[in-house]
């Protein structure tokens, strides 16, 4: 072993120290000098990589390592109590945004936390994968097709967690052999079947789901959801087996399949598909569906089967949605309805002022409360309606109020908006924070309305994943768990417009999702006055925890809206029909059970 | 885009090194990098996606830190050196993790005990110093020495694998 260089030892010491405390100017200069040598840079990178490993104690690529590290540690009990306690002790109070390094964050920046970023980005990638799929026009012609059927191949995975019976974890590029069964716990897996034949297709399995490969490479959906896009030609060359029979998909067609214990559905998004029932007792008649049609087979307690035809819905399938799906067509009638409720702030995002600062003019009653543009928000138009699109560029894209709100402490208020998250992520829809910046560049918050993602080891880990969170925090603070937090009873939907309302009425806080009460809390504290409103990020001055998706029709009131008013607003947006469709389709799914307090309107 | 999915853990490892393993910075830079990769994928020349992604990540990291008001630990020139050294390490992230777990097991008990207190029990250096009745500087010095031992052990393990 090479003797440890004294300078490298100093370099490591300074890096370790920098993780928990501030370095003096002299130490910073020394650290930079040492790192600017080849040996120093290599030493520094290797050390920080070690720190990453110790703060994860795991990685997606090598899940066994965490066990090995823990075992290595646990074998060395030092005082009889510490070695076997929980590996993570969360700080009881931690700031919303920790600017200190690993010293504090080692308690919070734990095993899987950094994977949230991967998850968020990969779900985004999933949206695109469909369009990046092989161009069917470039595929082999029918004449060129080989009669040998290639084994199905796993071509991409998005945040996939598998359950395997034999310790083998599927990897991208691997073939799935006949007889093999795969259980996807979560994530989206894309599988290419029938490559080089007229039966070539891209199948996207949405976890939780189970699939298997039969003889001849035929794909079977055991349970869960999948979508399939046929890339070949001809009639019925792509075959997917499910519990109700074989689904034969025509060339250049796309379908969705739902299969669980009691319900099976076939949706045809484009082209045609044929269902050949196989279940005994089921009508032997084949069902041919064309674009826009769907069929549902429901098992009744008496053992009978109910067959219902209905409209195909891409919204049932996460992997089939695109950002442009589900328009928000709100016009002047909607605006008039909102104005009748007398908002203090009403930002419609229809047009940007021509003078600087570029801003969205407030149509509510409060003067000097326009929404000034931060960075480069995008815009998307649905018919006559324009909405703001945030978080898709590398630079900031957000809005800040040009004035302060409210003018007096409030016992009642309502924050209302339409939102379409692009993906499951931790992002800020609306933040209300103090105007005075702290020394660290942060601001204490009074209201936070945000989308949550799965948090594994930080202070938000016990909150429902992929839900909306509304925080009312008086006194304003940057401490994560301070104040009253309300989390929606069910997850928000991605790439679907949803109506969100956060309401304080005296000591009663409530959070409403699509007109349904989703969470309640009691908090008598008043909302402090003279706050800064920010849309799309955590602080007015920094593009952090950015919201990714679309936002429209933000309205803020100095009073609580009644449920009746909320319903009127939603109906004014002409969303009642889609709500009905959702209600019509959802009751058959066990996971769509209404949480307590729903349907109060 | 599948290239990104296949390389995301290595890219994240690279970003964690150049952001000094700071959670929020790493997440922010990773998210920004993914966005830029998405937007500029048509400019990718088809050679070494990870190297291209890491170059963009380094640039995004520099932009991100310019917007921060915190004291900057590394100046831009140092970041350049660190990024150059981080790339080969990120490429080997899985092998390095495996080697690290083996190296931890080879440590003397007293060293494993200190590493365990610091990272497994998440005790601060100050807390460890108090419990051991030593100065914080002495604890830092010991941790520095052990990390040095682990680094050499990892390099040796990786070299042996190649042989």
Image (spheres, coloured by chain):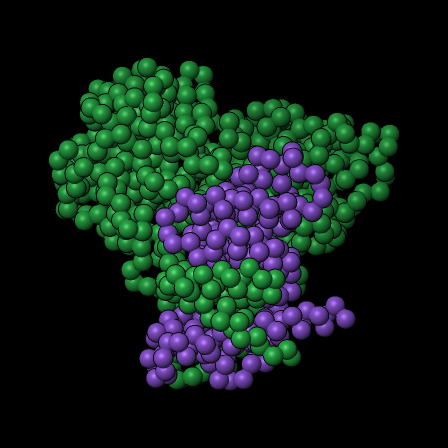
Residue A257 seen: no
Q: Is residue A150 depicted above or below A102 in this figure?
A: above
Please name the residue shown 60% across and 29% down the image. A268
Q: Is residue A282 depicted above or below A165 in this figure?
A: above
Q: Is residue A470 left or right of residue A179?
A: left
Residue B141 seen: yes
- Residue B99, x across and y down, in percent: 62, 70
Q: Colour of chain A?
A: green
- Residue A40, x across and y down, in percent: 56, 65
Q: Colour of chain B?
A: purple
Please name the residue shown 76% across and 40% down the image. A194
Give the quadrant of the N terminus of chain A. bottom right
Please name the residue shown 35% across and 74% down the image. B126
Q: Is residue A381 left or right of residue A252?
A: left
Give the quadrant of the C terminus of chain A. top left
Please name the residue shown 34% across and 35% down the image. A535
Q: Nearer the viewer, residue A376 or A194?
A: A376
- Residue A489, x across and y down, in percent: 34, 45
Q: Nearer the viewer, residue A493 or B150?
A: B150
């Amino acid at each position: 072993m090479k003797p440890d260089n004294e300078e490298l030892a100093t370099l490591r010491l300074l890096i370790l120290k920098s993780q928990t405390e501030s370095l003096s100017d002299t130490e910073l200069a020394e650290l930079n000098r040492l790192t600017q040598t080849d040996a120093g840079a290599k030493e520094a990178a290797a050390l920080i990589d070690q720190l990453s490993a110790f703060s994860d104690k795991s990685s997606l690529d090598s899940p066994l390592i965490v066990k090995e590290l823990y075992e290595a540690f646990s074998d060395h009990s030092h005082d009889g109590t510490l070695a076997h306690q929980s590996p993570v002790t969360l700080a009881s109070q931690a700031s919303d945004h920790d600017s200190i390094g690993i010293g504090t964050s080692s308690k919070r920046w734990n095993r899987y936390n950094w994977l949230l970023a991967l998850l968020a980005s990969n779900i985004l990638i999933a949206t695109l994968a469909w369009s990046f799929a092989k161009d069917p026009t470039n595929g082999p012609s029918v004449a060129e097709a080989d009669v040998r059927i290639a084994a199905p191949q796993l071509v991409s995975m998005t945040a996939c967690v598998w359950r395997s019976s034999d310790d083998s974890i599927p990897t991208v590029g691997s073939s799935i052999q006949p007889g093999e069964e795969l259980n996807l716990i979560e994530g989206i897996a894309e599988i290419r079947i029938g490559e080089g034949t007229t039966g070539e297709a891209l199948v996207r399995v949405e976890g939780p789901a189970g699939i298997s490969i039969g003889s001849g490479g035929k794909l079977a959906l055991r349970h869960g959801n999948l979508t399939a896009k046929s890339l070949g030609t001809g009639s019925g060359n792509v075959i997917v087996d499910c519990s109700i029979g074989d689904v034969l998909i025509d060339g250049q067609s796309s379908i969705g399949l739902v299969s669980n214990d009691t319900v099976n559905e076939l949706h045809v998004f484009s082209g045609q598909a044929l269902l050949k029932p196989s279940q005994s007792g089921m009508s032997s008649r084949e069902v041919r569906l064309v674009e826009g049609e769907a069929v549902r087979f429901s098992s009744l307690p008496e053992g009978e089967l109910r067959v219902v035809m209905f409209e195909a819905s891409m919204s049932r399938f996460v992997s089939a949605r695109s950002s442009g799906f589900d328009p928000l067509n709100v016009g002047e009638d909607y605006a008039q309805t909102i104005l009748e409720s007398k908002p203090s702030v009403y930002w419609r995002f229809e047009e940007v002022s021509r003078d600087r600062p570029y801003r969205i003019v407030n149509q509510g009653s409060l003067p000097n409360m326009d929404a000034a543009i931060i960075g480069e928000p995008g815009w998307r138009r649905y018919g006559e309606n324009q909405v703001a699109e945030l978080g898709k560029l590398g630079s900031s894209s957000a809005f800040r109020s040009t004035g302060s709100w409210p003018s007096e402490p409030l016992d009642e208020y309502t924050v209302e908006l339409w939102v379409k998250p692009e993906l499951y992520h931790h992002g800020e829809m609306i933040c209300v924070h103090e105007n005075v910046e702290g020394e660290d560049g942060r601001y204490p918050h009074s209201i936070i309305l945000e989308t949550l993602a799965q948090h594994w080891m930080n202070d938000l880990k016990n909150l429902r994943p992929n839900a909306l969170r509304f925080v009312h925090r008086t006194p304003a603070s940057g401490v994560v768990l301070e104040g009253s937090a309300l989390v929606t009873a069910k997850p928000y939907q991605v790439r679907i417009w949803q109506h969100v309302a956060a309401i304080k009425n005296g000591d009663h806080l409530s959070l409403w999702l699509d007109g349904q009460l989703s969470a309640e809390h009691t908090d008598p504290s008043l909302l402090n006055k003279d706050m800064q409103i920010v849309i799309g990020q955590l602080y007015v001055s920094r593009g952090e925890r950015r919201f990714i998706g679309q936002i429209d029709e933000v309205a803020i009131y100095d009073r609580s809206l009644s449920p009746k008013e909320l319903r009127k607003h939603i109906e004014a947006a002409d969303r009642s029909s889609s709500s009905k469709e959702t209600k019509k389709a959802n009751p058959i799914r066990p996971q769509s059970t209404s949480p307590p307090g729903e349907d109060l309107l | 885009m599948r290239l990104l999915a296949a390389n995301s853990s290595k890219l994240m490892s690279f970003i964690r090194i150049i952001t000094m393993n700071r959670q929020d910075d790493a997440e922010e830079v990773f998210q920004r990098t993914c966005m830029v990769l998405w937007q500029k994928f048509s400019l990718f020349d088809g050679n070494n996606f990870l190297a291209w992604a890491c170059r963009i990540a380094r640039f995004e990291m520099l932009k991100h830190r310019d917007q921060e008001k915190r004291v900057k630990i590394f100046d831009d020139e140092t970041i350049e050196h660190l990024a150059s050294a981080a790339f080969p390490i990120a490429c080997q992230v899985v092998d390095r993790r495996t080697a690290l777990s083996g190296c931890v097991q080879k440590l003397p008990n007293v060293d494993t005990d200190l590493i365990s207190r610091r990272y497994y029990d998440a005790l601060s250096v100050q807390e460890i110093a108090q419990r051991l009745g030593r100065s914080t500087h002495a604890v830092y010095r010991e941790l520095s020495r052990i990390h040095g031992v682990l680094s050499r052990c990892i390099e040796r393990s990786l070299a042996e694998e190649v042989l």
